Image: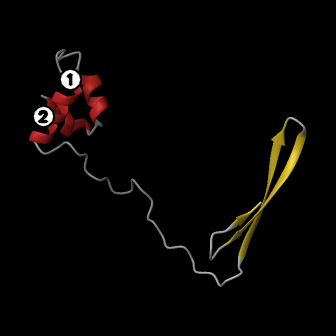
């Protein structure tokens, strides 16, 4: 029953545990995990489109800065935060 439920729903371990405990009251998290491991389905399959593709950062010449301004609300009122980041060394100045 556990294996069929996991294959059908593809729920994480804790969600499977909470869903199955009313029908199998003595089921523990470790027993559920061991059962799923024994049947080779303890890890959920990777679903395509889950994570965005990772891209390389564009290379910049030395001395290229990214500058940004942010408005910060404080008890005293508005403050402005100026940030400059050197793209090559990742050094930030505020």
What x and y, as percent, mark residue 87?
A: 65, 74
- The mark tally for this picture is 2
What x and y, as percent, mark residue 29?
A: 23, 27
Q: Which residue is found at the position 14% from the left and 41% from the top?
A: 37
Q: Nearer the viewer, residue 90 or 16?
A: 90
**Quadrant location of residue 68?**
bottom right
Q: Distance between the residues labelled 1 and 2?
A: 11 Å
Q: Which of marks 1 and 2 is nearer the N terminus?
A: 1
Dot 1 crowding, Cα within 10 Å, few <14, some 14–19, many 20+: some
Which image quarter holds the N terminus?
top left
Q: Is mark 2 on a helix, strand or loop?
A: helix
Label of residue 28 in the image = 1
- The correct choice, above or below, for 93 with respect to 17 in the image is below
What x and y, as percent, mark residue 72?
A: 80, 46
Q: Which residue is found at the position 83% from the left and 39% from the top?
A: 74
Give the residue number, with chain letter if any, for mark 2. 35
**Quadrant location of residue 82?**
bottom right
Label of residue 18 in the image = none
Left or right position of 33 against 56: left
Q: Which residue is found at the position 67% from the left and 83% from the top?
A: 62
What colour scheme governs how the chains and residues are painted in the rendered image of this protein? secondary structure
- The correct choice, above or below, for 28 with respect to 3 in the image is above
Left or right position of 8 against 87: left
């Amino acid at each position: 029953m556990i294996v069929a439920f996991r294959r059908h729903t593809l729920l994480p371990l804790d969600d499977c545990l909470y869903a199955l405990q009313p029908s199998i009251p003595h089921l523990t998290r470790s027993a559920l995990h061991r059962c799923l491991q024994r049947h080779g389905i303890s890890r959920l399959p990777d679903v395509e489109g889950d994570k965005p593709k990772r891209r390389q950062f564009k290379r910049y010449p030395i001395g290229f800065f990214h500058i940004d301004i942010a408005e910060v609300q404080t008890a005293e009122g508005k403050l402005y935060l100026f940030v400059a980041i050197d793209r090559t060394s990742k050094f930030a100045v505020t």
